[in-house]
Each structure stands twice: as C-alpha cells, then as structure tokens.
Amino acid sequence: MLHGKRILLIVAGGIAAYKSLELVRRLRERGASVRAVLTAAGSQFVTPLSLSALTEDKVYSELFSLTDESEMGHIRLSREADLIVIVPATADLLARMAQGRADDLASTVLLAADKPVLAAPAMNHRMWLHPATQANIATLTERGVIFVGPDEGAMACNEHGPGRMAEPQDILAAVLNHFAASAPLAGRRALVTSGPTHEAIDPVRYVANRSSGRQGHAIAAALARGGADTVLVTGPTHEPDPPGVTVRRIESAREMLAACQEALPVDVAVCAAAVSDWRPAAAADQKLKKKGGEAPAIELVENPDILAGLSEPGNRRPSLVIGFAAETENIVEHARAKRARKGCDWILANDVSQGTGTFGGAENTIHLVSAEGEEAWPRMTKTAVAERLAARIAKHLEEPA
C-alpha cells in the first residue's frame, strides 16, 4: 500500500488529462498524499478546482507566483515528494525535460528534482513514433525516468496506434511496483517509542516532562515509508498518528514496557520516548488537598528501564536497538557511557544545550554513537533526522551479520 507516500502529480496539456482525476482518487484510496502541479495547457482540460477537491490540497501552476513561492517554492515541491508522476506526459513536456528547459513551473520542478520520476506518455501515434520523440524517450530513460505506456488504441483524433495514455489502474500498478522495489525495509518489523510518560500522583496530577513526541513519530513514519511493518508505542502527545503505522497509546512507563514486550519480536527498536525515570510509589485515589501550606511528601521509586530491557541478550532481542539521550554538556562522553550502561547498539545524543536546540522543539542536533565510533550530524529538522536514521537502519540491516 501507499500509506505515508507523498506523490507530486504533474498534469500537462492533453485530452487524457481527465484520467489524472481518477488516478488521484486511486492513489489516495491507498493512503498516498497527492499534491498537484497543473500546467497552463493542462488547465484547458481539467480545472484547478477539480484537482484541489480530490487532492484536498492547493494546486500549483505559476512559476512566478509570489504567494506560491513564499509558501512552498518549486524546490520544496520536488524535495518533499517521494515520487513525481506526470499524467499525461505530452511530447512537448518530454522534449523540454530532455533539453533541461525550465520555462514554467512543471519543467522547473522536474529540472530541480532529486526524486524518481514516472511518466505516462500520451500523444498522437505519429508524434510518438517521430525520431525526435523516440530520441527524447531514450535520453530520459538513460537518466532514470520510468515510463508506463503508451498503449495502442483509438485516440481522440480518430486515429489508431501507439500513443494512447495508460489507464489509471496501470499507472497505479507502476507506482506500487516502484515503491515495492525501492522499499529498503520491506519485510522488516520495527518498534518505536515516542513522547513522554505520565506518572500519576493523584487523579489530576502527574510527573512528566516536555517531550513533544515529534521525533519519535517522525521516525515511525520514516520507517513505515521505507516499507517496515512499524508499531509506535506513544505516551500522551498532540502529534497525529503517522500513516501506515500501528499505534499503541499508553500513559505510564510500565504500560509502555508492556506494550513494547507485546510488539516483539522486531528487527529494530528505536527508543525515542522520554520515559520518566521515577514515579510516585503509590498514586492517591483522591485529589491531594492543601493542608495549611504544607507540601505533601511524595515517595518516588524508579521506573523500569525499557531501553536496557530491550537490549538484554536473548532470542527476542532486536537485531538493532537504538536509544536517545538528551544532553546539555559532554554530549559524546555521556552518550558513550549510556550506550555501555544500557547495552544498546546505537545512541543518538540530542544536544539540547542553550543555543543548539530545545527539548521538545522542531529541530535536533544529533551525535550518533556506536561501537564503530561517533559522527556528528548537522542541525536539522526532526523529519530530516528521521529520514537519515531510517536510511542508516536499512543499510545496517542489509549488511551480513
């Protein structure tokens, strides 16, 4: 399925453009998010309103729109997609792609793209068979563009031959095949913990921390996009459930431990949750009342160590166990000590010192510490950290034991 996959659909000018609407519906039924770029010629066949209604997103068409460029920009349009799909791919657009032209939004996005491109050609059969078009197809194929179709059949010009655009179900099948072939974590199982835990003091108060859950949720989403069967065990957060991920919601550290044990066996476990180190020894049944300004004495006991528990040797130990460490000083040294103490394979030390990052913020500054050494990652968004980590996990699991 396509849960969590991001498709950028480019609709060019041809009578077959109407089929793009059916393709959007089929992609979204399978969990993909779709964003559309509509060329000026394409808008003669389908309307921005139709595409917007089906994608539930804004439709982009103007290269020099001050609003579009400030909100999204042609670079981000391609960067934030997992796959670019051109439906229909006209002779004109294919020629401009082969030449490296960038004279409208669609061609500029394609020239700036660092993501795979899948094209469904559609044109008169004489245009398709012309040596110029065939030379352009050969050039684009050599550059890695994936083609689906064209089919042979009747055309809108009342002629018959090769050039009829592939049907939406065939284009969908090509998209599914692309992701199946490019899913580095297909067949793997992953466990991710995320967010804080809440340790009850009484029915209305609890011990917690400032974890937002953004990083753990982003990691679960990235692993799922990579093809992994992913379980996310999360404490209370305001983050939406990642697409294509099985979510288990918990409150306390003990509940998180039980949910993690239930999810085993897995190939990789990523402990990104900020689990409370302590909990009240006994939660009060009723709300604690003030007694003349005297603060109640709350006895704390240590919570179970989930990371250390998952790292213990045994036949249910994941092949790769990864922990997080939020540090404000001596980042690498503390991370090395924690890795040795917990018995995990990797530690991602998050530098939350002043001026570098904030606990629960939108960005992280990561140091990956493993038995092989340490590497510093540049400061980046939590989504970028998740993508980089998912790629590293896939590479590690592919290596022979």
Image (cartoon, rainbow, N blue to C red):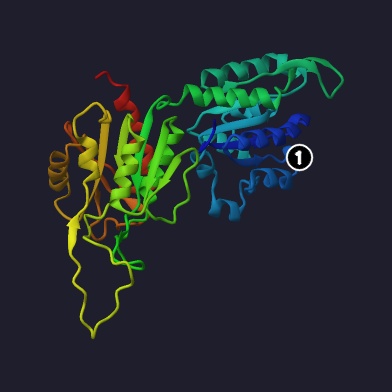
Label 1: how many Cα within 10 Å (few below 14, some 14–19, many 20+): many
- Please give the name of the residue rendered at 20% of the width and 68% of the height, measured from the top-left corner: 298
Q: Is residue 184 left or right of residue 155?
A: left
Q: Nearer the viewer, residue 78 or 294?
A: 294
Q: Is residue 289 above or below residue 370?
A: below
Q: Is residue 95 left or right of residue 292?
A: right
- Residue 76 seen in render: yes
For residue 358, what is the image quadrant? bottom left
- Please give the name of the residue rendered at 67% of the width and 37% of the height, measured from the top-left corner: 25
Give the farthest residue toward the bottom. Answer: 292
Q: Nearer the viewer, residue 201 or 359?
A: 201
Give the farthest residue toward the front. Answer: 285
* Residue 365, horizontal then vertical, whole percent: 28, 49
For residue 291, what is the image quadrant? bottom left
Kind of element beneath mark 1: loop
> What's under tag 1, amino acid-wise?
Val
- Please give the name of the residue rendered at 56% of the width and 18% of the height, measured from the top-left corner: 141
Circle 1 is placed at which residue position?
46
Tag count in the figure?
1
Q: Is residue 122 above or below residue 322?
A: above
* Residue 288, horizontal then vertical, whole percent: 29, 74
Quarter the C terminus occupies: top left
- Please give the name of the residue rendered at 49% of the width and 38% of the height, measured from the top-left corner: 244
